Image: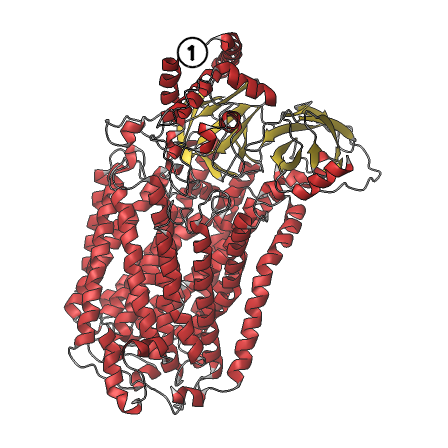
Amino acid sequence: MSSVTDQTLDHDSHDHHHAPKGLMRWLLTTNHKDIGTLYLIFAFTMFLVGGAMAMVIRAELFQPGLQLVEPNFFNQMTTVHGLIMVFGAVMPAFTGLANWMIPMMIGAPDMALPRMNNWSFWILPFAFAILLASLFMEGGGPAFGWTFYAPLSTTYSNDSTALFVFAVHIMGISSIMGAINVIVTIVNLRAPGMTWMKLPLFVWTWLITAFLLIAVMPVLAGVVTMVLTDKYFGTSFFDAAGGGDPVMFQHIFWFFGHPEVYIMILPSFGIVSAIIPAFARKPLFGYASMVYATASIAGLSFIVWAHHMFTTGMPLFGELFFMYCTMLIAVPTGVKVFNWVATMWRGAMTFEVPMLFALAFVILFTIGGFSGLMLAITPVDFQYHDTYFVVAHFHYVLVSGAIFSIYAAAYYWLPKWTGYMFDEFLAKAHFWCSLISVNILFFPMHFLGLAGMPRRIPDYALQFADVNQIVSIGGFAFGLSQLIFLAVIVKAARGGEKAEAKPWEGAEGLEWTVPSPAPYHTFETPPVIK
Amino acid sequence: MDLKKIGLCWLAALVTIPSQAKDMPLNLSQGVTDISGQVYDLHMTIFYICCIIGFIVFGAMFYSIVRHRKSRGVKPANFHESTKVEILWTAIPFMILIGMAIPATKTLIAMENSDDAELTIQVTGSQWKWHYKYFEHDLEFYSVLATPKKQIENKLAKGENYLLEVDRPLVIPTNTKVRFLMTSDDVIHSWWVPEFAVKKDANPGFINEAWTNVPKPGIYRGQCAELCGKDHGFMPVVVIAKEQAEFDAWLAEQVAKQQAREAEEQRLLAMQLSEQELMDLGKRTYDQFCSACHQPNGQGLPGMFPALAGSEMVTQDRQGHIDIVLHGKAGTAMAGYGKQLSLKELAAVVTYERNAWGNNTGELIQAADVQARKNAAD
Amino acid sequence: MSSNQQVAQPNHGKLAGRLVLVVVAMFGFGFALVPLYDVFCEITGLNGKTNDEAVQVVAIEADLQRQVRVQFMTRNAKGVSWPFESQLSTIQVNPGVMTQVEFIVENPTNKAVVAQAIPSVSPGLGAQYLRKLECFCFNQQPLQPGERKVMPMQFYIAPDMPKEIGTLTLAYTLYDITEHDNNSSAEVAMAK
């Protein structure tokens, strides 16, 4: 994919005889498009690594009994799969999209803090190298789930925990730097006339996401630090013997964790809100209410954390409070879905690949929302909690939600990045294979959960065997389908039909006013928005 | 390429699933208790509401996809807001949510009232077994996975209740409010019996409570629901509900048995077992209780569980060795087996560890030696 | 790259600086959650935490009409072999009436140790109504070799405890904190 930006570089290289070439160029780059590309490549690489771990998990679960891996290794796979997908795939992919698109959408020449931008990317590979290296330690890597509940992650973990904590710190610093950069860029670098209520929704959702990031990533840093000091320096934050409390870990973790969930979905809302109007050839319905809905989802995310821990034993009124607040989130989320449907209503729709992914997003994300609403109901949550029903729920919102929206975004803006149209046949094959397999993979998990299969187990009772087999087949198919995407990208980076400045008929926004591929520098003179 | 295809493929996928999974229920269990029935009703109510909303939203969307497509030559409309509609679709979901919250609140209040329980049982989780103690009765025991290792390793055909069977199930009386006090010796576990709609975390150092009132005699199976380390998938919960009279008889019998066992142990203290006997029993005990962590070859899992072969404690510190097997070690995964195993088994397993895998200390540990260490602590 | 620097405006630094302050503040907030959590637990009875210091003795009216069942549970943490028991397993009390119960711990080893009992009450909501005037759990308990200690615990049930609570369970888990606490045990040894 390096040829992607080689293209853009050639296009504009007369300005940059002094720019370093080769590896040094990528190491030292402060250009938002270069960094965006790096983030996207990194995210996809991590997606494949995390996906490979998911394949190990599904292979072990293909049949009852232990066939391929030891339980301890199985736990390492579930743990590192989760960490990589959250911090290595979804979040960097969104940051990559933000880097590429936000300056072009608001008419800025670059991100506001380009050197910090370079740092925030380049520390990431180290974080994940450390995390992955810990798998090869004596006793293996972290095996306590991506939620690292104490005391499993403190007293009862092995020494890879130190590496885990260090890696999470670096990931956190990277995210925080990225978020600061996004906020400063959006606040300070909007082109003249780009008022707040004219911002594209992708920019709005990212702005709100960035605020969530700087609010909660430091809390994550705090809680991993407590894990570290509990394990190595004799503190007792989470150890009852010293006056601590293991349940407090969960409170602090989920105070970070719930907003984190929205960090991984708000930018998706922005992407879908750009794509649906473009292919329905009709302006987005209820722009203002979209902005308010996003802000209220973000606000609510701070007061619902304990719905992840109803079974820890909470006083009745606590359970009621968190149940009601969680149910409330359905209102702004519903508004968003209704707005998207209203945008399609009486439009003139066409179904290019970005639109297909966006439509699949709306449906499948809503299904994930329904199961989320079911999970919010405390008495029933006692049955769903920690079963495959939860696994199905969060994979619906994260895979067919966040990841599908990232694919939609990638197909939507790919012509702008490479200057070529992608191979539509391959892309559609990627879409249909993914759509079918993702449902074979995750839909039956609802049934497994309802029938009583706990999550994070390497072996299961016989009645779960048939459905697990179907799920695993769906999993392998979904995994293979993602390789088609790799083929599409490589092909589009090498060449193809030349893309126009605005390859999609109904697309709106400043990014379509610059040529395709986007020149190395855009909007050095700010455009004026009427 | 159109969306009809999605629908068809997707439907096909969904339809094939139920037909292949004959044994597995595809819905939440109604359970056997009043509470689990209420929970099931709540689950179905919310599910139907979601279905209706889904039908309307997806219906509108698919209608739009079919009718409002450019290939039909439609001209796009240009509306992009309507305060009235937007208020309406904020307010209506809000009303629906209130409708959901009312029954949910009622059920929750019923669930949280554990008062007037007639029997209290202390449930303690540890890596990776459950311990039950009948409050105010002289009875306590461990409940450990009974599925043979060979079934897990696919060397033997798997039994009907594979991974859902234990050596000593918890027994409770029917039509009695039973209160469970959950706690843990090491990490967080979660005690779950789906048929009772009871799932509660067992937190180390703290107690949590839950209750049930089972109307029907039967065997009810569940599992640990919170990731608790390596063998999280291998610590099932089995509860047998018996009629009150039958339960009372069972309880009396168990208490008597437990006392008889203790008396028998005392009587056998003077007995000297031969090396052969100790090593045979020791190996059996070791394979069942110790090998999950320390491995059948005594090598442990480096970085996680220490090796016993060649270990300094095992080859030299005899007292320390007996103590750690009896009481466990704080701050590690090593649990104490003093309450779980008989003196004979404890003596045998220590003997085995001190003589297997090249640890040829030649020492024999007898029940009296273990009792001496136990007394030091009793 | 040079062009980036040209557009970089000084106010970026100011805004970024403020955001960094927010980050630092939120990092601090993460740690502030620890004491906040304790306060939260105290108010709500989350996790059944009881008062860890003696309550002030105030004149309270006993409610002789009502009886509350209090169960005592004693547990040893892993690695702790010292017998630790409650003299009574259950007691019926009237709210507002001062009650004293006794717990017994013994150190059968030949080493001086330090024990700490951690209390937990269920149902959690009842925790704040169980008021302890004196409890061995307020302090670390040094135990000399062979020492047998009878430890009193004085409490009353606040009469305003909700009627729904008819049974309270008070559990103590005994931990060995000898190593955690070398300093204070050394002091104890010196004092003796």
Residue B80 can be seen, yes or no: yes
Give the residue at the far right of this rendering: C59
Report whether C33 appears left or right of A92.
Answer: right
| Residue sitting at x 82%, y 37% | C60
| Residue sitting at x 54%, y 58% | A222
Q: Position of residue C189 (x, y in %)?
A: 73, 36
Report whether A199 appears left or right of C65.
Answer: left
- Secondary structure of the residue carrying tag 1 is loop
Q: Where is residue A142 in the image (x, y as percent from the top left)?
A: 41, 49
Q: Where is residue A404 in the image (x, y as percent from the top left)?
A: 30, 63
Residue type marked 1: Leu
Quadrant for residue B311, please give it.
top left
Q: Name the residue under label 1.
A: B273
| Residue sitting at x 29%, y 63% | A45
| Residue sitting at x 39%, y 81% | A103
Q: Where is residue A98 in the image (x, y as percent from the top left)?
A: 38, 73
Q: Quadrant of the N terminus of chain B?
A: bottom left
Q: Is residue C30 above or below residue B188?
A: below
Report whether B343 appears left or right of C38.
Answer: left
Dot 1, how many residues are within 10 Å of its Cα: few (below 14), some (14-19), or many (20+)? some
Q: Which sits in the foreground, C160 or C189?
A: C189
